[in-house]
């Protein structure tokens, strides 16, 4: 029922489908941040990611943590696919494009930073949109990779990641 409804504010028209996808994305990123930074599982996952050997010495079953992390990542990947499916049609051959975009988002925001992933995704969306609008519809991927190279040269840890 909301597929053809749109909202106008500040001279912009945004359809409800995109707003619902944005809301779902924000809920998912908040859930991931809560899981990683407010639960014992998150502390164990972060400890294993930082120092696998030391986590094992503290009694953490590292193989179990890898399985848990794979399950959490798979659940969030499925949820992300559902959110993308709300906005755009896609097919299995498109996975390469989405994987590259996800890689660029992670590099822009910083590995291991949910807020960085959100910021990197928003930045990539703005880059793609403005490139399509002002340079041409054939150039968003080229601009995306130009920004990726510049980012890797200037700040390889990402915009919101801490140096280790």
Image (cartoon, helix red, strand yellow):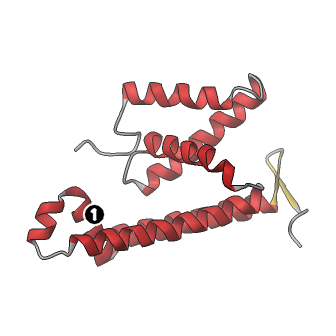
Question: With 150 as the anchor, is 69 left or right in this view?
Answer: left
At a point 58% along the width and 63% down the height, the residue shown is 26
Residue 133 to residue 63: above or below: above
Location of residue 49 with respect to 105 vertically, above or below: below
The quarter holding residue 56 reads: bottom left
Where disc 1 sits, the SS reads helix
Q: Is residue 23 visible?
A: no
Instruction: For label 1, count other residues whose C-alpha is less than 10 Å away and answer few (under 14), some (14-19) or many (20+).
Output: some
Residue at 51% in and 44% down = 105
The image quarter in which residue 19 lies: bottom right
Please provide percent x and percent y for residue 144. Answer: 58, 32
Residue on which the image places disc 1: 46
Looking at the image, the residue that sits furthest to the front is 93
State the residue in front, 96 or 109. Answer: 96
Across the whole image, how many numbered discs are drawn on residues? 1
- Residue 108 vertical position relative to residue 91 in the rendered view, above or below: above
Q: Residue at x 29, y 67 (%)?
A: 45
As drawn, the residue found furthest toward the top would be 135
Seen from the viewer's position, the closer of residues 77 and 28 is: 77
Measured as percent of width and height from the top left, residue 22 is found at 66, 59
- x then y, percent, for residue 117: 48, 51
Image-based side of 154 in relation to 84, left or right: left
Locate the N terminus and report the quarter of the image it occupies: bottom right
């Amino acid at each position: 029922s909301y597929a053809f409804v749109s909202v106008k504010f500040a001279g912009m028209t945004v359809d409800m489908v995109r707003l619902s996808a944005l809301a779902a994305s924000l809920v998912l990123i908040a859930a991931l941040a809560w899981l990683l930074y407010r639960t014992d599982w998150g502390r164990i996952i972060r400890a294993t990611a930082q120092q696998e050997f030391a986590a094992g010495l503290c009694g953490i079953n590292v193989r179990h943590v890898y399985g848990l992390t794979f399950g959490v990542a798979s659940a969030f990947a499925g949820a992300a696919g559902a959110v993308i499916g709300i906005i755009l049609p896609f097919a299995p051959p498109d996975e390469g494009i989405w994987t590259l975009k996800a890689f660029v988002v992670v590099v822009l925001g910083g590995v291991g930073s949910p807020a960085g992933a959100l910021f990197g995704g928003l930045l990539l969306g703005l880059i793609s949109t403005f490139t399509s609008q002002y340079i041409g519809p054939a150039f968003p991927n080229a601009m995306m990779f130009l920004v990726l190279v510049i980012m890797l040269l200037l700040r390889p840890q990402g915009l919101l990641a801490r140096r280790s």
